[in-house]
Amino acid sequence: MYKILTLNNIAVAGLARFPRESYEVASEMQHPDAVLVRSFDMHRWDCPDTVKAIGRAGAGVNNIPVASFTQRGIPVFNTPGANANAVKELVLSGLFIAARNLLSAAAFTQQLTGTDQHINEQVEQLKKQFVGFELAGRTLGVIGLGAIGVKVANAAEALGMNVIGYDPHITVSNAWKLSANVKNVSSVEEVLRKSEFVSLHVPLVDGTRQLLNADRLEHAKTGLVLLNFSRQAIVDETAVCAALNKGKLSHYICDFPSNQLQQQKGVITFPHLGASTREAEENCAVMVADQIRQFLEQGLISYSVNFPDMDMPINESCACRLFVANANVPHMIERISSTVARDNVNIVDMLNRSRGDVACTLLDLATPLSEATLAVLKNTEGVLSARVLTPNY
Ligand SMILES: NC(=O)c1ccc[n+]([C@@H]2O[C@H](COP(=O)([O-])OP(=O)(O)OC[C@H]3O[C@@H](n4cnc5c(N)ncnc54)[C@H](O)[C@@H]3O)[C@@H](O)[C@H]2O)c1
Ligand SMILES: O=C(O)[C@H](O)COP(=O)(O)O
């Protein structure tokens, strides 16, 4: 029986991927084999030794201490793209809200009282204060052209906007998906100089923390609308408030309310709603559940943020499969195979892949491995984690 601990609400469609006869899933349990999480802050969480995998039902992994899990030989999975459409749609809402003053206009009509005739008169007399502008023909700059940025760029282009994009690390697959009309520019400053709207779609890592700071905001076109559906710390909020007060920015629309933003004119915040659609929650939950099952049951890895992809069909003459996560240093395969040789077992298939400082080895063995040999392997220099899986043909 595998045990799955959930640290956030995970969509039922995903939890249903774990067969009841072989999985127990709960939000409180002892000795979990894997953990499913959304935005729960795992930096402050004591992870039990039994945990073999972490599944983030979503994109951002800044709430997960990935480096320390890597050192413990634990893969962290996420679900790139599974919530991208939901975020794209919220970003588009932000563009419309800013261009047509929709929130203040709706607040105005809500406070109207009196007869219908009186309300109508007020509407026709005062609507001029909410006159907006059209998106078509305006320039949107997209910073970060990953799963979300590409969708935002393409959708804005379809609305008739001019779109420019900046992403020094764009993947080949995302470059293929990007509309040919999206122009590539070479710096954040250039995006700010040329755009009426800028939308941020980068992950929060050391290199993107306060990517938009006071110096960079100086380059913005006067009246820029800045949208941040990535993470709060991608911008320097003090600099954003100063830019709003100077009129450099006309709006800051983001998914991350804070004390400082609460009273600031020009700010519109949402309660981290980017991925909160039924579709996105289900997509993420199903994708991550399948990744966790594949790893627990077969040692296979796809969409991990810290481990290499691992894909090897279980050999039909295999009695057990050994999964080893090890440091990516010389002599590891030699150490693993000589330890396994203590049991005089034959290796019928093998896969070894590496990524950065970590490597993974899968060995399909013709006969079972003893507990004693597994214990020796776990204590072998350079081995981060090891476990034996019994194939379920
Ligand atoms: N508001 C929400 O609910 C919500 C939902 C999903 C994702 N997000 C956030 O959005 C982020 C992006 O999600 P995604 O699915 O598009 O991820 P992704 O990994 O597909 O794309 C991120 C892109 O950013 C690029 N990038 C990295 N550093 C950059 C830099 N300095 N300048 C320009 N580009 C840079 C990468 O090359 C990559 O193409 C997530 O990490 C998460 O923080 C928020
Ligand atoms: O990175 C993400 O996928 C989003 O921020 C979604 O977070 P959530 O799963 O807590 O809604």
Image (tube, rainbow, N blue to C red):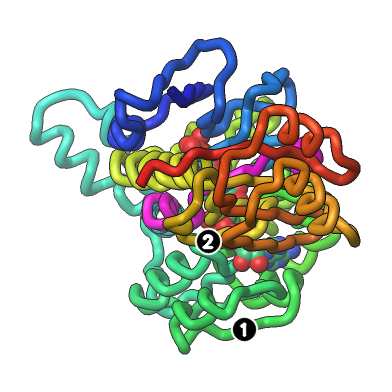
- Is the residue indicated by label 2 positioned so its CB lies within 8 Å of ligand 1? no
What residue do we see at 68% from left, 69% from top?
A: 192
Left/right of residue 333 with respect to residue 156 in the rendered view: right
Amino acid identity at mark 1: Asn
**Would residue 150 be visible to someone looking at this image?**
yes
Q: Quadrant of the N terminus?
A: top left
Number of on-image labels: 2
What residue do we see at 67% from left, 25% from top?
A: 259
Residue at label 1?
184
Closer-to-camera residue (179/215): 179
Residue 322 % position (x, y): 62, 45
Residue 120 % position (x, y): 15, 40
7 falls in the magenta region: no
Left/right of residue 15 with respect to residue 137 in the rendered view: left
Q: Is residue 160 above or below residue 279?
A: below
- Mark 2 neighbour density, 10 Å: few (under 14) some (14–19) many (20 or more): some
Which comes before the other along the chain, label 2 or label 1?
1
Residue 358 % position (x, y): 78, 53
Residue at label 2?
311
* Quarter of the rendered image showing ligand 1: bottom right
The residue at the far bottom in this view is: 180
Report the span colored magenta.
Answer: 67-88
Amino acid identity at mark 2: Asp
Closer-to-camera residue (79/201): 79
What residue do we see at 74% from left, 61% from top?
A: 355
Q: Is residue 170 above or below residue 90?
A: below
Q: Is residue 139 above or below residue 200?
A: below
What residue do we see at 9% from left, 32% from top?
A: 116
Closer-to-camera residue (169/16): 16
86 falls in the magenta region: yes
Q: Secondary structure at mark 1?
A: strand
